[in-house]
Amino acid sequence: MTDQIAIEARELTRTFASFTAVDRISLEVRAGEIFGFLGANGAGKTTAMRMFIGLLAPSSGTARVAGHDVYSGSEAIKRSIGYMSQRFSLYEDLTVRENIRLYGGVYGLPDKEIRARSEGMLARLGMEQSADTQVRAIPLGWRQKLSFSVALLHRPQIVFLDEPTGGVDPITRRQFWELIYQTAAEGTTVLVTTHYMDEAEYCDRISIMVAGRIGAMGTPAELKREFVTDSMDEVFVRLARPSQVEAP
Amino acid sequence: MKALLGLLSKEIYHILRDRRTLAVVVLMPVVQVILFGFAIRTDVKDVRLAIVDPSPDHVTLEIRHRLEASEAFTTVAVLPTTAALDGFFRRGAAQMAVVFEPRFATRLDRGLPARVQVIADGTEPNTGSTRQNYVLAVLRDYDRELGTAAAGVRIVPSMRMRFDPTAESSHLFVPGLMAFVLTVISALMTAISLTREKETGTMEALLVSPLRPWQIIVGKVLPYLAIGFVSMVLVILEARLVFDVPLRGSLPLLLFEGMLFILVSLSLGMLISSRTSSQRVAMMGAMIGTMLPTMLLSGFIFPIESMPEILRWVSNVIPAKWFVTIARSIMLKGVGLDYLWPQTLVLCGMACVLLGLSTRSFHIRLE
């Protein structure tokens, strides 16, 4: 990635039958950036993310992730990214340690490395005590943090987080964002979808999706200036409103 | 390889930690074979028999005695006329009736045909005609012993099945049952475990990972193949010990063919799960997709030879049809691969096609 671009999309489109979920979006995410993907439910953020990570084929347009083309390089992309879905992605009937082992193995890490990294991870999360507890028995907030750390286990260049803080209390959300900052500080690019507007403020740059299109993109400060307001909520509402009027 | 081992051990944890499901999966075939094995037998045993004998004489008494002497019939009533017979059938007090003509012995002595009517309960047509045949055989035996060949006993109802006093129906049924229960649980196991991963979201995590589709599939199939193997061994033991079904052929061959058949069923379950993302739908799909065709079209209950041509043709795509033939041939006839290779090849082909299709469905990205 000589040009330091982690994710690049040009006119990326995905249609389902007659419905256009993502409509010709273009964007660039720089390496090491925390990029927020905002939008109302159904605005197309998850669909766009699924195209980046290779779970969904684009209908048209191009995109490159970690330097690889999404059409031809999906295997290479898979090795360079981490992903945490909005649904929980750990196995509830496995213990914390077994989950870490499993995903370490899936990403082809050597045993020694898995052991070392899992000890480090458990220590950082303060979860040494729960290492041999089945995941179903640990609180949701911890699970989310664990899920995030597991997605980073193989040290991906880019990590995709799909509404990682849904249903989590404010304190845990705060801690979660600290984890995200740490990750970005270590050089990992973070692309995160959310519909909490306060979280938008934590991002380096954001794009707000409205009905499949990018309604606005920039740093939080730029957007607030552009819409002449001091709250992201206001930016979002102004963007979302006209689209509702236009909607057929 | 290491990734695959990880997947396998994960699946084994799933299986071992869900003890209740494991017990159901392993024991269900055993219980089903017992239930079905006893319930669907068409042996003639303890049939409630009503006798209408207007003028008892030495011939009718002898025939009645012979019917009672076998374990097949229990005489519940001896009536002078047919008037009350209807009531017996309606109440279910009688399942069969044998009606003698008046002056039975006298007619025989004079060289006239003596008519006897064998009435079976028409609500159970299959077992009914088996029972009729049984009575018919008793009558024929007696007739032959009398030696008055010219003036034979004439029996009114038309007979469709041949009576073979040595045929234990369970010998034919149990191999068919094996096919039935193994296919149902195998398809269920993979269908449910894959859709569960879709429902909980872990499937996405696996699909985003560098795992290859075949690795995900092998990781799913191998552990359940092992469970299927345990089930099959239990069912074979049961067939030998409870139903006394002979095993005239080679046990290793039977086990091999069984594994092949289980593999086909597991792949079918995977294919079903690739078409749905809800456990409930997958479960229904697997049950209906395996139970009905296996029950109706595999030759396990209804003989394929007597089906209309279209159904006979359709039955060829039912994996159980081939396995039923294989299991019966190995267990009852004792034949080997030299005779069963065509059926074996068909099952191999089905396994390849189904596994291929499921692998492809993993290539196609998630909706």
Image (cartoon, coloured by chain):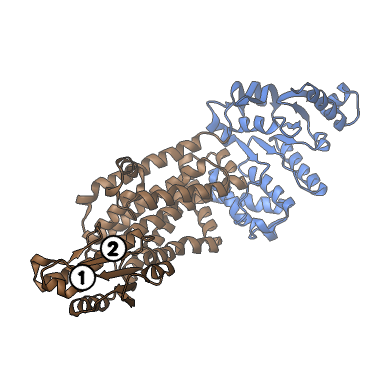
The residue closer to the viewer here, B184 or A89, is B184
Residue A220 position by quadrant: top right
Q: Chain of mark 2?
A: B
**Do the residues at discs 2 and 1 belong to one chain?**
yes
Between A168 and B158, the residue placed more toward the observer is: B158
Any idea which chain is the brown one in this picture?
A: B
Amino acid type assigned to the residue bearing label 2 in the image: Thr
Whether B40 is drawn above or below B276: the answer is below
Residue B130 numbered mark, or none: 2
Chain ID for label 1? B
* B238 relative to A56 in the view: left or right: left
**Mark 2 burial class by Cα count in 10 Å: few <14, some 14-19, many 20+:** many
Determine which of the numbered discs, if any, sits on residue B138 in the image: 1
The blue-tinted chain is A
Q: Position of residue B260 (x, y in %)?
A: 35, 50
**Residue A174 visible in this rendered orientation of the protein:** yes
Q: Secondary structure at mark 2?
A: helix
Front one among B132 and A225: B132
Image height of B149 relative to A21, above or below: below
Question: Residue A106 at what x, y percent from top left?
Answer: 54, 45
In the image, what residue occupies the spot 82% across and 35% down? A197
Q: Determine whether B100 is above or below A131 in the image.
A: below
Q: In which quadrant of the rendered view does residue B317 lie?
A: top left
The amino acid pointed to by label 1 is Val
Q: Residue at x 69, y 61 (%)?
A: A129
Residue B316 x %, y %: 32, 43
Q: Position of residue A108 (x, y in %)?
A: 53, 44
In the displayed structure, B243 sits above or below B192; it is below
Tell which of A50 and A34 is nearer to you: A50
Quadrant for the C terminus of chain B in the image: top right
Residue A139 left/right relative to B161:
right
Q: CA distance from mark 2 to mark 1?
A: 13 Å
